[in-house]
Image (cartoon, helix red, strand yellow):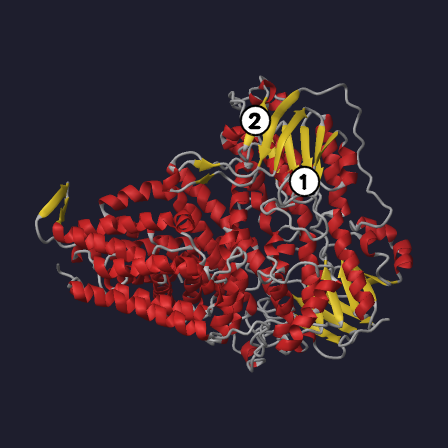
């Protein structure tokens, strides 16, 4: 069963291997000794900073093209300038860079896993680069697309129209067409919704069964991959003395022996839901802050027609319509639904960031011109001028003091070059004091990082910072777009506990999420969006095109 | 993987000698800088059109003051990639992007792009691709602006070909100033900001934020 | 904006021609038209180009929808030429400081028509040419270095995503209190910040895309092509067509005595 023409499973050997990235002082990996037999399936775990991605990149042969030229150079220059390699890392006894196509890599972000605009061309890309004869490429392309379950789509299907899960399967197909002996997956499902996660995992399983290739996968969520792998290797951050491998063995044994350590490192161990703060039971319905009626939403802006049509505006086609929403103080509202149903679009419209296509979003007097906000204790000196009922028309500063929005990608919200300035930005512009900032720094464990550039933080730190910066303006409504995507269990638990505290203190929390456990912690109501009745979003069966412009 | 040519070993010995061959990441990042530059300029001009159209109708050469926006990719690309050809390549890609999106200049936009890129490229080449400080950036921006002005005023497809000499001169002065300030100055500032965020980690410009401003 | 990079089911005849042949034909017309500012050569070329619309899968309505900003730009170009060209003949209109004479007006109109006749074939070219096919032709037929051609093609695919991110970053920054309102200086600063945010994302995306491409073996010297870019009989017709239009434009202008070399423009 375990063989397919052209695929020879690869073996990996590391002996005292280490890597320091150009311009860094500390190595990302050091002293790694590891043997992976042909056909083995390995799940790589470890805290962030353990060098998991670095190892995968090295195996994929994409490391070491240091900007200053010489990779492995331990030459006379010797500064922290150039990248530095120690020991050896080999695939089948040879350097990965010397054997292109022996290993194939799928990374986390679906958008940048696609190279070309047409489905078939994208799959053919790798085979072309390996100089596979043209006549042999197209049969390979069809086979690979069949293997990942995309065989029903035409070869000229636009890759831009694929969902996240489909893009990741496409990336897998592109690799399969190279017939690699080693599959490297770097958190391939971290950015996907639950359906997408399973669809990618199952496709990987089918392909491994067919080809018998070796697998090395990095992923926080152990439960997804546990049954597919036959070995777990836990790495630890590089140090001069210790070995890079902390624990190594069959999944059940490693999970039993290292459970506490893994939980401490934020790994999602199967059967473990991090402890979070419980909400105190509500004392009755909170005051309504925001209402939406007959609301239709779209991310597109009205277009301006040409001269002949008198430059009139053409309203965009809404992705959802006829929605009614009530947002109440101290209550959570969770917006759920499949990808492409306009969850984020709805949330951004409620948040006063997108103009409704039809219908209204209106703030009640409680939100638009409160005499004293819920945080009345320190409202002295701030201007709480009355704003109109329509949040979209509010000035930016009026908006942030009332409705705070945390975007899915924290980097999109950074406006300064320092963590502290980032936190002070809102309060300074609103004329608030600094006490809340200190409290947030403390509470979200950012005190050590005040001088860092926000872009240089880790994923979890960026998430905590983005929540803190928005809260520093004391909004009464907090809107979050997929706040738990790609987060480790520790950040997840912190975030959930923190939000439940805010809710109890009277803030309204609206979140777009696929994460049922997260919704459970926050409680409150769920608004489930369905695909639109007519049009392209109609009953998205497998591999049916989802509407554009509606990102997950 | 790209061009790890024969220089293995010898390159590390003499720190002065850099690897000038382009890696895949250089090519893709340079091209996307040009593409992003196009998106930014497109968004920018949406708002600015309201002001610029009446101004141009009154004294058209003033539009040269605005031209620097087009040349940002040339200077920015070189400041980040720091390899020969970066200015020329980025500006050509930017022009190609404009052609694909639909340009009022037709295919001649490619010639403009190549010439503007060349204007900046020549300045960096004159400093042997070793200096990327503020004065050199401003000069490179001015070079791009100068070539832009010359192209528009003296080549057959230039839009200002029929102007009187004085107006041509005014236009060229304006594009040069605009190139120096907008393309040169802003690109230099942007590079320093980008270096601080850590995204330039794999490029020779990764330490741009701490390099001296003038030397 | 993402749509601009696909043919959207266009199956017109010219979509099957080699991009390089189409590009050469368009360049030929462009360069010949650029040599003279006169309304005859421009009008003749423009008329032929309009006749070719169906072959490129375009209709006048579609063209109008996509191309009206170009027409406005051409009109503005004509206007600036009319007011700034050296005056000759009787002054028709003394618009304040800028007198428009008969000569400069004729030049302005010629310039406007020429601008349209140069812009239109490029729109035609891109509406019947898929960027992937163009890249294939540039690398295989024109022998440009394939690493640069394909690297650029892959980066250009992200233009739609960049445009979406621009919008998202704008909203995300409003949610931080950075408004797009205020005085011009504040707006300018806000736009600069938004641009910086986009550049960071562009470099991050490009770096990841480069890893994706390298991990698929991209960057080596040897490579095969799954889509061979070839020439056919159609391409000969395309070239002949380009040559024909250029020749007709020149002949008509010479015949009418309006041919007016740009370098000698006096009127």
Q: Quadrant of the N terminus of chain A?
A: bottom right
Question: In which quadrant is the C terminus of chain A drawn?
Answer: top right
Could you classify mark 2 by the number of other residues whose Cα lies within 10 Å: few (under 14), some (14-19), or many (20 or more)? many
Does residue A135 appear left or right of residue C170 in this picture? right
Circle 2 residue:
A360
Q: Chain of mark 1?
A: A
Q: Residue at x 56, y 22 (%)?
A: A368
For discs 1 and 2, the disc positioned in front in the rendered view: 1
State the separation of the CA atoms marked 1 and 2: 21 Å
Disc 2 is placed on an element classified as strand
Give the percent coordinates (x, y) of residue A166: 69, 55
Q: Position of residue A524 (x, y in %)?
A: 75, 29
In this view, which residue lies farthest toward the top?
A371
Which mark, by number, is residue C101?
none
Q: Quadrant of residue A450?
A: top right
| Nearer to me, B203 or C29 | C29
In screen coordinates, is A289 left or right of A415? right
Instruction: List the residue tagged with mark 1.
Output: A531
Secondary structure, mark 1, is loop
Name the side, left or right, on which A516 lies relative to A439. right
């Amino acid at each position: 069963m375990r063989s397919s023409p052209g695929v020879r499973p690869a073996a990996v050997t590391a002996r005292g291997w280490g890597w320091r990235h150009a311009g860094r002082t500390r190595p990302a990996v050091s002293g790694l000794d590891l043997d992976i037999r042909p056909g083995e399936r390995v799940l790589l775990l470890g805290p962030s900073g353990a060098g998991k991605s670095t190892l995968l990149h090295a195996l994929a042969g994409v490391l070491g093209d240091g900007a200053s030229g010489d990779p492995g150079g331990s030459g006379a220059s010797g500064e922290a300038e150039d990248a530095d390699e120690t020991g050896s890392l080999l695939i089948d006894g040879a350097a990965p860079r010397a054997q292109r196509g022996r290993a194939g890599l799928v990374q986390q972000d679906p958008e940048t896993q696609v190279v070309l605009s047409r489905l078939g061309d994208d799959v053919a890309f790798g085979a072309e680069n390996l100089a596979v004869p043209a006549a042999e490429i197209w049969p390979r392309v069809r086979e690979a697309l069949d293997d990942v379950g995309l065989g029903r789509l035409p070869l000229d299907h636009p890759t831009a129209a694929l969902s996240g899960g489909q893009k990741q399967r496409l990336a897998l197909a592109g690799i399969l067409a190279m017939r690699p002996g080693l599959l490297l997956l770097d958190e391939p499902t971290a950015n996907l919704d639950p359906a997408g996660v399973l669809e990618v995992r199952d496709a990987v399983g089918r392909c491994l069964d067919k080809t018998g290739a070796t697998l090395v996968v990095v992923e926080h969520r152990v439960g997804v991959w546990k049954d597919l792998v036959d070995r777990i290797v836990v790495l630890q951050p590089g140090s001069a003395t210790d070995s890079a491998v902390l624990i190594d063995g069959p999944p059940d044994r490693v999970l039993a022996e290292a459970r506490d350590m893994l939980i401490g490192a934020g790994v999602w161990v199967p059967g473990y839901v991090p402890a979070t703060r419980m909400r105190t039971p509500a004392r009755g319905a909170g005051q309504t802050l925001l209402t939406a009626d007959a609301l239709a939403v779209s991310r597109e802006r009205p277009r301006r027609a040409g001269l002949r049509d008198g430059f009139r505006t053409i309203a965009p086609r809404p992705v959802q319509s006829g929605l009614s929403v009530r947002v109440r103080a101290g209550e959570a509202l969770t917006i759920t639904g499949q990808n492409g149903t306009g969850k984020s679009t709805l949330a951004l419209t409620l948040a006063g960031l997108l103009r409704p296509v039809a219908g209204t979003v209106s703030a009640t007097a409680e939100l638009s011109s409160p005499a004293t906000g819920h945080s009345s204790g320190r409202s002295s000196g701030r201007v709480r001028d009355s704003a109109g009922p329509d949040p979209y028309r509010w000035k930016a500063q009026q908006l942030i003091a009332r409705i705070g929005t945390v975007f899915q990608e924290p980097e999109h919200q950074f406006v300064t070059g320092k963590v502290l300035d980032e936190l002070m930005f809102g309060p300074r512009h609103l004329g608030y004091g600094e006490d809340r900032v200190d409290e947030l720094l403390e509470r979200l464990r950012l005190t050590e990082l005040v001088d860092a550039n926000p872009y240089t933080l880790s994923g979890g730190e960026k998430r905590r910072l983005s929540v803190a910066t928005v809260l520093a303006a004391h909004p009464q409504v907090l809107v979050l777009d997929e706040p738990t995507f790609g987060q480790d269990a520790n950040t997840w638990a912190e975030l959930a506990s923190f939000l439940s505290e805010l809710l109890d203190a009277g803030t309204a929390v609206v979140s777009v999420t696929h994460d049922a456990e997260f919704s459970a912690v926050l409680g409150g109501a769920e608004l489930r969006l369905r695909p639109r009745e007519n049009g392209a979003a109609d009953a998205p069966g497998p591999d049916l095109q989802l509407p554009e412009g509606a990102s997950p | 993987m790209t061009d790890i040519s024969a220089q293995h070993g010898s390159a590390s010995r003499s720190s002065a000698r850099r690897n000038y061959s382009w890696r895949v990441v250089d090519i893709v990042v340079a091209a996307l800088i040009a593409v992003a530059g196009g998106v930014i300029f497109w968004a920018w001009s949406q708002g600015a059109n309201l002001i610029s159209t009446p101004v141009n109708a009154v004294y058209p050469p003033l539009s040269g003051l605005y031209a620097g926006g087009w040349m940002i990719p040339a200077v920015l690309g070189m400041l980040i990639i720091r390899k020969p050809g970066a200015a020329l390549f980025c500006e050509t890609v930017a022009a190609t992007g404009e052609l694909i999106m639909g340009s009022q200049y037709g295919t001649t936009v490619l010639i403009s792009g190549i010439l503007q890129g060349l204007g900046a490229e020549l300045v960096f080449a004159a400093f042997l691709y070793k200096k990327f400080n503020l004065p050199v950036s401003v000069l490179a921006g001015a070079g791009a602006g100068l070539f832009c002005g010359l192209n528009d005023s003296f080549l057959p497809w230039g839009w200002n070909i029929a102007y009187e000499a004085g107006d041509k001169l005014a236009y060229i002065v304006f594009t040069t100033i605009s190139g120096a300030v907008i393309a040169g100055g802003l690109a230099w500032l942007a590079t320093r900001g980008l270096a601080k965020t850590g995204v330039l980690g794999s490029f020779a410009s990764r330490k741009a934020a701490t390099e001296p401003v003038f030397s | 904006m993402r749509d601009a990079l696909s043919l959207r089911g266009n199956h017109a005849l010219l979509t099957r021609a080699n991009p390089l042949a189409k590009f050469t034909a368009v360049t030929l017309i462009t360069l010949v038209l650029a040599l003279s500012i006169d309304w005859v050569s421009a009008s003749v070329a423009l008329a032929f180009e309009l006749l070719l619309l169906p072959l490129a899968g375009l209709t006048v309505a579609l063209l109008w929808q996509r191309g009206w900003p170009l027409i406005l730009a051409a009109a503005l170009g004509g206007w600036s030429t009319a007011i700034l060209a050296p005056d000759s003949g009787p002054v028709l209109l003394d618009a304040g400081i800028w007198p428009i004479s008969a000569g400069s007006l004729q030049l302005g109109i010629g310039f406007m028509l020429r601008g349209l006749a140069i812009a239109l074939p490029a729109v035609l070219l891109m509406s019947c040419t898929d960027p992937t096919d163009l890249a294939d032709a540039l690398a295989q037929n024109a022998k440009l270095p394939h690493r640069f051609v394909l690297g650029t093609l892959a980066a250009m695919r992200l233009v739609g995503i960049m445009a979406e991110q621009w919008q998202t970053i704008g909203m995300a920054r409003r949610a931080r209190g950075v408004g797009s309102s205020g005085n011009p200086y504040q707006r300018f600063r806000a736009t600069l910040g938004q641009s910086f945010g986009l550049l960071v994302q562009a470099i991050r995306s490009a770096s990841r895309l480069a890893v994706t491409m390298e991990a698929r073996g991209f960057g080596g010297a040897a490579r095969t092509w799954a889509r061979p870019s070839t020439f056919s009989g159609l391409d000969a017709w395309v070239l002949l067509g380009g040559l024909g239009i250029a020749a007709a434009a020149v002949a008509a202008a010479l015949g009418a005595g309006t041919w007016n070399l740009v370098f000698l423009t006096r009127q």
